[in-house]
Image: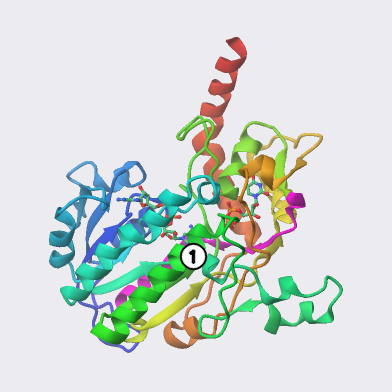
């Protein structure tokens, strides 16, 4: 760790980071990176700590004095401002961010992504503290191309689908499509953070993750999360594979996504943390434009990879189609395609993702199999016995 320098060759001084939502998927990987590879301190704030308990126990581990867990719900805890004041930098990851919630719990979604984030922005601004705020690629909504006729040649033109931080519009569906409650709340908090920067000098960076995936993402229903819960697609498909049931393709699985390995994405966040002069005032897409697939292709690839890592043949009917109404209920809608433009992050931080979709699925599904296969088998045999 000695002699670490930033992108401009200046020495990196250890800082204290108040990380809100540190116990989640991204937070757990960011905490690991900071403990394993940097001298920085983390004040880890969350209501859960399961995903970082390996970093908190036992008290003798070498970084024990560099990470502290604070079980705090930021909705209603006066300790938050004190922690932000103690830190040099605040990173806000806390959010409700699973699509199954956006149309079924729109109030909780809006409160979590906008109202609950307000005090964090305010305390950073009032106390002159830097903020890295986690937004989402969903703020782009649908592509312009989605509104062109199906056979229009313009649909092939990147100008109609590549998503650029400083040029693309945010295109959401009607209010009754409550799916967009999340994107809209995230857009408004982005505008507020940006306005605090413009009017009050807040030093900020906004991150727009494009489908970061890897170990510890979400939960497996009935094992480490509610049986009826609907996590994001990686965990839904992992659950289906573990249970040897068909993967469910919502509305034909035609939507397109670019998936990035969590470890590649965390490298980008560390660059933002350690290069404030290059990151402040910017909004960054963080994704892997080379890993684009339709959801159907993702299902097929996950089936193949899982078969390899589990050494089990795949089932006869690996996928089935379901309607979005059946799967998510009323008010669901979808982003059609998400390709991040990488110009700004390349220019400012010289960062590029590395891991191919096949490789990231191989390491992630190896983890899923090792972590859950036995527990799923036991849970299924109990259900059959009852
Ligand atoms: P996650 O759900 O795993 O983590 C969020 C964490 O925030 C959870 O541990 C949760 O307990 C905590 N939290 C929520 N409300 C809280 C509160 N009131 N008080 C304290 N803690 C609270 O999600 P994630 O995938 O790690 O996402 C982190 C951030 O990145 C979110 O803001 C999300 O919108 C954004 N994001 C992630 C992705 C992705 O690909 N993973 C994509 C787009 C946006
Ligand atoms: N999806 C699917 N089957 C599932 C879960 C999700 O077909 O079991 C689809 C979903 O409709 C969306 C895509 O997979 O088109 C990605 O969903 P995810 O929950 O990961 O979040 P999003 O990328 O939409 O934010």
The residue singled out by tag 1 in the image is 184
Q: Does residue 275 appear in this view?
A: no
User: Residue 81's image quarter?
Assistant: bottom left
In the rendered image, residue 267 lying in the magenta stretch gets the answer yes
Give how far across and how far down residue 264 sits, in percent.
49, 66
Q: Secondary structure at mark 1?
A: helix
Identify the residue at horizontal 72%, vertical 75% (top origin).
145
Please state, as top left, top right, bottom left or bottom right, where the N terminus lies in the image: bottom left
User: Residue 144's image quarter?
Assistant: bottom right
Beta carbon at label 1 within 8 Å of ligand 1: no
Identify the residue at horizontal 55%, vertical 80% (top origin).
342
Q: Colour mode? A: rainbow
Residue lying at the far right of the rendered structure: 151
Q: Tell me which segment is drawn in magenta.
A: 251-276
Identify the residue at horizontal 74%, vertical 50% (top origin).
251
In the rendered image, residue 352 lying in the magenta stretch gets the answer no
Please state, as top left, top right, bottom left or bottom right, where the C terminus lies in the image: top right
Identify the residue at horizontal 58%, vertical 24% (top origin).
377
Establish if 252 lies above or below 386: below
In the image, taking residue 87 as reference, residue 367 lies left or right, namely right
What main secondary structure does the magenta stretch of the protein show?
Answer: helix
Give how far across and how far down residue 308 sits, in percent.
68, 44
């Amino acid at each position: 760790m000695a002699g670490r320098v930033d992108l401009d060759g200046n020495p990196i001084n250890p800082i204290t980071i108040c990380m809100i939502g540190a116990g989640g998927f991204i937070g757990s990987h960011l905490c690991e990176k900071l403990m394993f590879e940097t001298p920085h301190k983390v004040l880890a704030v969350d209501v859960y700590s399961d995903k970082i308990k390996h970093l908190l126990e036992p008290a003798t581990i070498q970084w024990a004095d560099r990470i502290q867990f604070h079980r705090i719900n930021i909705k209603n805890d006066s300790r938050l401002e004190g922690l932000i004041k103690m830190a040099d930098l605040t990173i806000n990851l806390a959010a409700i961010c699973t699509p199954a919630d956006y149309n079924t719990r729109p109030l909780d979604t809006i409160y979590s992504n906008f109202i609950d984030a307000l005090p964090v922005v305010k305390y950073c601004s009032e106390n002159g503290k830097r903020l890295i705020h986690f937004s989402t690629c969903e703020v782009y909504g649908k592509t312009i191309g989605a509104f062109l006729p199906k056979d229009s040649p313009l649909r092939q033109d990147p100008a109609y689908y590549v998503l650029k931080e400083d040029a693309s519009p945010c295109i959401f569906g009607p209010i009754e499509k409550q799916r967009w409650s999340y994107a809209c709340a995230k857009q408004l908090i982005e505008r507020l953070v940006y306005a605090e920067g413009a009017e009050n000098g807040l030093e900020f960076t906004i991150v727009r993750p494009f489908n970061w995936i890897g170990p510890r993402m979400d939960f497996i229903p009935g094992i480490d999360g509610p049986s009826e819960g609907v996590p994001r697609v990686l965990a839904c498909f992992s659950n289906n594979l573990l249970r040897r049931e068909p993967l469910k393709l919502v509305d034909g699985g035609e939507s397109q996504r670019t998936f990035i390995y969590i470890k590649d994405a965390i490298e980008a966040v560390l660059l933002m943390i350690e290069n404030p002069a290059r990151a402040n005032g910017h909004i960054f897409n963080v994704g892997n434009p080379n890993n684009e697939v339709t959801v159907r292709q993702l299902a097929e690839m996950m089936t193949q990879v899982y078969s390899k890592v589990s050494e089990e043949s795949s089932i006869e009917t690996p996928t089935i189609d379901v309607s979005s109404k059946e799967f998510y209920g009323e008010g669901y809608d979808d982003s059609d395609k998400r390709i991040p433009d990488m110009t700004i992050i390349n220019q400012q931080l010289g960062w590029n993702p590395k891991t191919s979709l096949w490789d990231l699925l191989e390491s992630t599904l190896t983890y899923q199999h090792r972590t859950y296969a036995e527990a799923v088998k036991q849970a299924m045999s109990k259900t059959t016995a009852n």
